[in-house]
Structure formats: structure tokens, C-alpha cells
Amino acid sequence: MHGSARAPAAGTVLNALATGRGSAFAIDEYVHATVDLDDSGTVTGTVADAPDADTTLIEACVSAVVDAHGDGEGGHVRTETEIPMAGGLKSSSAAANATVLATLAALDVDLTRVEACRLGVDAARAAGVTVTGAFDDASASMLGGVTVTDNTRDALLDRRDRDWEVAVFVPDERAYSADADVERCERVAPTARVVEELAREGRYGEAMTVNGFAFCAALDFDTEPMVAALPEVAGVSLSGTGPSYVAVGERAAVTAARDHWNDYEGTTWLTTTQTEGARPT
């Protein structure tokens, strides 16, 4: 009983911590998961090249799928990631999606991708790695493209394809979503509602930029990387609860942003949006 899958990372359009409404877009970087089920009744997990990594989430995802669609199986899940962990690029959502799809493949169970996504979101809540349930991040990773969601109901409000070039800057620090100051984020709720309106109109670049300035202030991150990328890019934002920043637009614009960000301490790269979403492999 073997299955494997991959799920993409994502960047933020609207952080859901202020109002429960969020928006994100998939990018072409991946978490890969392999799952081998057996009759042990116990689930274990490992993260490649990170022997001390917390495997609670991926183990919870296997258990959630087995509880819903299996017959008490145990087994082992192994993930490999191209995405920096705790960087704001939705590594947890991608790991959950890849693990859920790999487990479903091992059980030979066919669900819609939205149903599979909700299994991973529920497991993430149970594992305590997310405040909101992160259905915005998880849906973008699972479905590809840009999604807008109501995380309080795990409801998909909108999904559209969008082809962008993307620049990513990951500072050397790390920031865990579960540690974010929710009360401070709720103070920018009026601005978040404006961001939601822009996103629902398909004005994602503008939405990202307004979101970025609001949540840099709320979460105490530097706005300088955003200012350095403007005005050439279509949009730039703090991604998730940080510390990463993402910029989208034409190749020349995001390349210029990457070049500015190379002056900071951290890692930068160029990639693209991804519209296919997560898939068994």
C-alpha cells in the first residue's frame, strides 16, 4: 500500500488572521510525500535532510485519512521539501496536501481535491500548526492558481488562473504561524476588508501590496523589501506571517526586485506561479 504525491508552495495575497478571509497563489516549488501503509496501526514520519523536524502534522494527515477512509492502517510518511520551513511560503499546507494525496493513493480512494484539502486543514488544526486552519493557503496549494476563501467555514469563494513571474526573498530568520500575534492582526481588519474587495475583483497585485504594508506593521516586519520592489512589480507582500516576501509581475520587474533583495541577508530566487495544483506522482 504505497502512494506518493507533490504539492506546491504558495504566496500571500491576503492574510486571513485579521478577518478569517484569506487569499493565496500557488508557486512552482514543491513538497513531495511518500506514504507506505501497513497493519502496524502506528504512524511514523520523517522529513528528508531534517532529522529533528517536527513530524506531527504529516503523521496527523496520514491518521486523518486512514480514520476517514481506511481500516486502522499504520505506516510511514516521508516528505522532501524545496520550500523553506517556517518561512511564510506555506510549507505546512503543501506538506499536508502532499501527505493526504499520497495516503489516499495508497488506499486507492478517490476524493475531490477540495475534500482532500479539508482533510489536511482539519489535521493541521488538530496538530496546532495553524491559527486559522489556513484553508486559503491549503486551497491555493491543492488547486493551483489564486484562491479566495472564508477560513471560518473552509469555504472556497473564488479561484482563478493567473500567470506571473515571481521573486521570493527569504530572510535568514524564521517565523512560525502559530506564534503570530492575532490580536495585533485583528487591528488591521478594516484594511484587510479592502484587500479582500480588491482580490474578489481580480486586482491581486494591488491587494498584495496593501496587505503587505498592513501586515508588516501588524507583525513588526520591515517594509523596506517591499519599497525596494516598487513600483515596477505588479504586487509585493509579506508572505503569510513572514518572514518571506513575494513579488509578482513581468520577468524584468521581478528580476529587478530579486536584484535589490540580493543586498539583504537571506536567500532569493525567481520562479513562476503554478496553476495545476497538487497531484499524485
Image: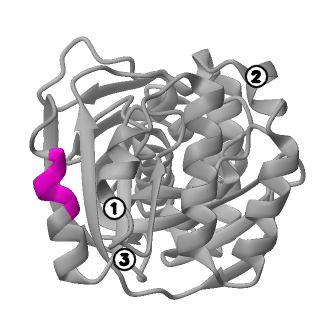
Q: Residue at x 66, y 28 (%)?
A: 218
Depth check, front residue: 175 or 153 = 175
Q: How is the image coloured?
A: one colour
The CA distance from mark 2 to mark 3 is: 32 Å
Q: Circle 3 sits in a helix, a strand or a loop, which is it? A: loop
When the figure is inspected, residue 147 is found, relative to residue 48, above or below; the finding is below
Q: Is the C terminus in the top left, top right, bottom left or bottom right quadrant?
A: bottom left
| Numbered badge on residue 220 | none
Work out whether mark 1 precedes mark 3 in sequence or the reverse, and give the earlier one. 1
Q: Which residues are magenta?
A: 257-261
Residues at badges 1 and 3 in contact (C-beta under 8 Å)? no
Q: Residue at x 51, y 88 (%)?
A: 161
Residue at image coords 43%, 75%: 234
Circle 3: residue type? Gln
Q: Which mark is residue 184?
A: 2
Q: CA distance from mark 1 to mark 3?
A: 16 Å
Circle 3 residue: 274
Residue 151 in view (yes/no): no
The type of residue carrying mark 2 is Arg
* Badge nearest the viewer, 1 or 3: 3
Name the one closer to the observer, 175 or 211.
Answer: 211
Find residue 54 and report its horizontal and vertical position in percent. 38, 17
Q: Earlier in the sequence, mark 1 or mark 2?
A: 1
Badge 1 amino acid:
Ala
Would you identify the image quadrant in which residue 275 lies? bottom left
Q: Residues within 10 Å of mark 3 (few under 14, many from 20)?
A: many
What x and y, as percent, mark residue 53?
A: 30, 18
Mark nearest the camera among 2 and 3 is: 2
What residue is at 18 percent from the left and 16 percent from the top? 51
Return the mark for residue 5.
1
- Taking the magenta stretch, the answer to whether it contains residue 241 is no
Nearest the eye: 58 or 159: 159
